[in-house]
Amino acid sequence: MRLDKLLANMGYGSRKEVKQLLKQNAVTVDGEVVKDSSMHVNPDEQDVSVFGERVIYTEFIYLMMNKPPGVISATEDLVDQTVIDLLDPLSQHFKPFPVGRLDKDTEGLLLITNDGQLAHNLLSPKKHVPKTYYAKINGVVTEEDGIAFKQGVELDDGYVTKPGDLKILKSGPQSEIELTIQEGKFHQVKRMFEARNKKVTYLKRISMGSLVLDEELELGDYRELTSEELNALKNIE
């Protein structure tokens, strides 16, 4: 890989700005100052440094975010703040995107990456990747609701959902539940409860496949996936 392309890809500026770094003797390869921007390097085998700090080449990034309400799951928007707007400039440089989406007012687990193949696998209907949500419901949630969800419920547009697994945490005028589904229709959790004449008042995604929301992440915070988390996601069959 060309040296200028490597440094540009890693967020050290445009090709023109990288050339300025080279002129400043700021770039070394295996300890030797380099001025030739077209030099080919292997970042896995050679020590490329800028101002003495080694450049760790990364092609893909994988971030877990605790999405806050009021922010939309998109890469850009002319009106609303997006989840990408919450990232630091270096992470934005990789041009990541959210894997799937959470409604604007929904909180919780959101995977952000630039790995298109992984995103495709996680979102493919053939993979049946489960997604679990915690919700507060205006209305008494009953075992009959659980039976209906397990059979699949008809939404307002006539679509019948795939079976969902409902766990009642608290039943009463204001119920609390966990619901696991294997698809992601528009406003699906809310519409499933509406089909049972109940209203979702709070919704939070807590897991997607093997990936579980890190409860230490405050709303709007994010972190890189651990190697264990990433490997588990990549091993989805």
Image (cartoon, rainbow, N blue to C red):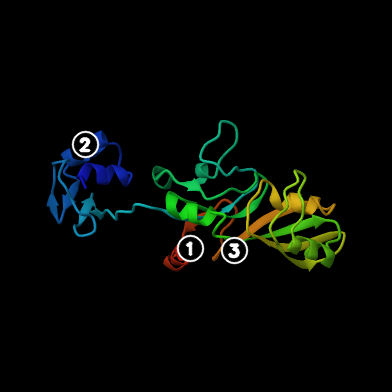
Of labels 1 and 2, earlier in sequence is 2
Of labels 3 and 2, earlier in sequence is 2
| Tag of residue 23 | none
Res 72 seen here: yes
Q: Position of residue 33 (x, y in %)?
A: 13, 48
- What residue would you read off at disc 3? 215
157 relative to 237 in the view: left or right: right
The image shows residue 186, relative to residue 147, as above or below, that is above
What amino acid does circle 2 point to? Gln
User: Mark 2 Cα within 10 Å, few/some/many (few <14, many 20+)?
Assistant: some
What amino acid does circle 1 point to? Leu
User: Mark 3 Cα within 10 Å, few/some/many (few <14, many 20+)?
Assistant: few
Q: Real-space Cα distance between discs 3 and 2?
A: 43 Å
Residue shown at 60% from the left, 53% from the top: 219
Q: Position of residue 25 (x, y in %)?
A: 16, 44
- What residue would you read off at disc 2? 20
Residue shown at 60% from the left, 42% from the top: 72
Asked which secondary structure carries label 2, the reply is: helix
Q: Position of residue 195 (x, y in %)?
A: 80, 51
Q: Nearer the viewer, mark 1 or mark 2?
A: 1
| Tag of residue 233 | 1
Quadrant of the image occupied by residue 204: bottom right
Q: Nearer the viewer, residue 224 or 190?
A: 190
Residue shown at 57% from the left, 39% from the top: 81
Quadrant of the image occupied by residue 234: bottom left
Q: Nearer the viewer, mark 3 or mark 2?
A: 3
